[in-house]
Image (tube, rainbow, N blue to C red):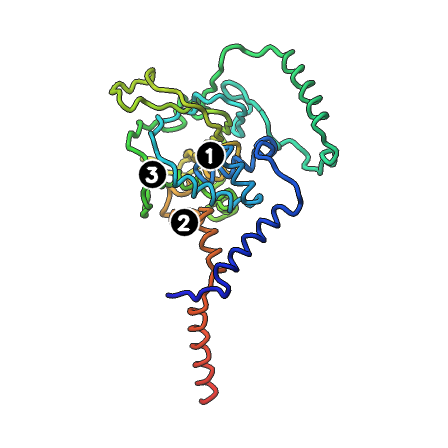
Amino acid sequence: MGYVAVKGGTEAIDASLRRLQYDRLKGEKILEIETILATMKSLVDQVMSESSLYAPYLAALAIKQAEGSMEEAVFIMRAHRSTLPRLYYSETAETERMEVKRRISASFKDIPGGQLLGATTDYTHRLMDFDLLNESVEMNAEWLHEFAKEVMELKPDAEVKYFPKVVDYLRKEGLFKNYSMDETSPFDITKQSIQFPVPRSARLQTLTRGQTGAVTALGYASLRGYGQVHPTVGEVRVGEIPVLISHPHELDESPENHYYIGEIEVTEVESFVPVKVKNEQNVEQLEFEIGYGICYGQNETKAIAMSILDQCLEHPASSFPTHDEEFVLMHIDSVEATGFISHLKLPHYVTFQSKLDSVRQVKKGEEQG
């Protein structure tokens, strides 16, 4: 197939780019990268998650460059990520070692270690806050000063506290199966093209960098009736996990010889999904399976939806589309979806003219007949 060049060529494209620049500058305001980082955390977290690149500063820069367009910011980040060298692989992150900022369970009121509400909009009224119209740096500084005084009056535990997993508590009761550790190297979707069926590691990678709205929509579809999966959230935890690497030239890979290079904030979800299975007497009984979700930053809705889809895709025999890994995984990628839809704006003169000629021939034949 050949495309006919748009009339005007290079000059028209250059003028279009200059107009784009004009639209960004005509308000004569500059949005600092630090301002985006300080005030748009959720947007930064989503861009990092969907681009598979944990780099808050670069995500904020992409948001500025894309003028707030999520899909364009993710595209920019993915493109930049493809230029970066991969110097090493990190060790497996143990989320039990997470420095928890928020931890809740919808399954139990009292969980080992207790619930920690942390920062969330779950308990706000979602009413328009018109006080923000008169916000000032001085007012914010005063509020922060008073907040710091309140914190200083508390008596925090000097010892770092790690919270146990809720599911481990249930496993001790024999209510959940114990599985042996799978040491198989994970599939890397950034280095290998996926071919169906794919291993669970590839499914989880695709889900965690899937478009937030798409993952949420398909998770909702499953809840609503396309599979009728209705889990109970066993645990949502938000916090920072350490990233460790081993020395590339040392044979001793024991944990005490790992190097700490930083930490990343993640949201982790384990959902409990009731399923009916037949026992040895061929009698149906209720059991639970676990759906897992994890993503960069604080994005609880996406992580919960991911846990729903994870459990769905473990049962591909179902006829529902939310259980079809090809349907789910190929349609949640932000860059793939945006690129394919956007390509429809490109010239299709030749193909459309061919279709027009076919229609004209049919019409002409009908008139002659």
Q: Nearer the viewer, residue 133 or 16?
A: 16
Can residue 255 be seen here? yes
For disc 1, the neighbor class at 10 Å (few under 14, some 14 to 19, many from 20) is many
Q: Marks 3/1: CA distance? A: 16 Å
Q: In the drawing, what numbered circle is on residue 341?
A: none
Residue pushed farthest bottom? 368
Residue at which label 2 appears? 330
Task: Name the residue rendered at 54%, 45% in the picture.
Answer: 66
Instruction: Using the rendered view, name the quadrant where residue 184 is placed.
Output: top left
SS under mark 1:
strand
Q: Residue at x 58, y 31 (%)?
A: 34
Q: Residues within 10 Å of mark 2 (few under 14, many from 20)?
A: some
3 or 1: tag closer to the N-terminus = 3
Q: Is residue 182 above or below residue 214?
A: above
How many marks overall?
A: 3
Residue ID for mark 3: 188
The x, y position of residue 357, in whole percent, is 44, 77
Q: Does 349 sit above or below residue 327?
A: below
